Image (cartoon, helix red, strand yellow):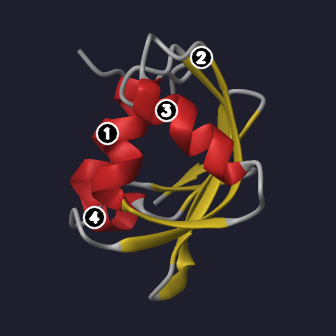
Amino acid sequence: MAGSLRDFPIDGQTLVGALAAACEPDELWVLTLLEVNGYGGSERLRALVEQFAAGPLEVTTRALCEALANASQIITFDARLAADAAMELYIEDGEVYIDNLSSRRGGERYVISGYVE
């Protein structure tokens, strides 16, 4: 069962739940930061990390979700929707700093200072 982005640490299932709830499977992301702890035996996750090592990466919601689902912990993650750069999810040191996607999920918007209405 996926937790909340407010929980620490954030695991892959939690991140996948947030992405899937806010975005369509074929929406394109620009991934600029990615560090995970534990691949959970996922070759898709290993491949995503290897592709990302070459620099920022464009990837669909579906591909992100399939790759990240087994990550035991998300250390850093920064992605923006390619069609709307204002829609960003930024995780640093295992905690959410920016979650502008939550408005698409019908939830609160998160900024560095905390949750706001």
Say which residue label 3 marks: 45
Say which residue label 2 marks: 9
x, y percent for residue 18: 35, 45
Please tell me the numbered disc located at residue 66.
1
Q: Secondary structure at mark 3?
A: helix
The kind of residue tagged 3 is: Leu
CB-based contact (under 8 Å), mark 4 and mark 1: no
Q: Secondary structure at mark 4?
A: loop
The kind of residue tagged 2 is: Pro
Q: Residues within 10 Å of mark 2 (few under 14, many from 20)?
A: some
Name the residue at 23% across, 14% down.
1
Please say if 107 is above or below 114. below
Name the residue at 78% across, 29% down.
93
The kind of residue tagged 1 is: Glu
Residue 107 in view: no
Q: Earlier in the sequence, mark 1 or mark 3?
A: 3
Q: Earlier in the sequence, mark 3 or mark 4?
A: 4
Q: Earlier in the sequence, mark 4 or mark 1?
A: 4
Name the residue at 51% across, 13% down.
72
Say which residue label 4 marks: 23
Please say if 47 is above or below 38. below
Q: Secondary structure at mark 1?
A: helix
What distance separates the C-alpha of mark 1 from that of mark 2? 20 Å
Residue reaching furthest to the bottom: 83
Please say if 107 is above or below 40. below
Q: Secondary structure at mark 2?
A: loop
Which is in the foreground here, disc 3 or disc 2? 3
CB-based contact (under 8 Å), mark 2 and mark 4: no
Name the residue at 22% across, 62% down.
25
Which is in the foreground here, disc 4 or disc 1? 1
x, y percent for residue 95: 67, 32
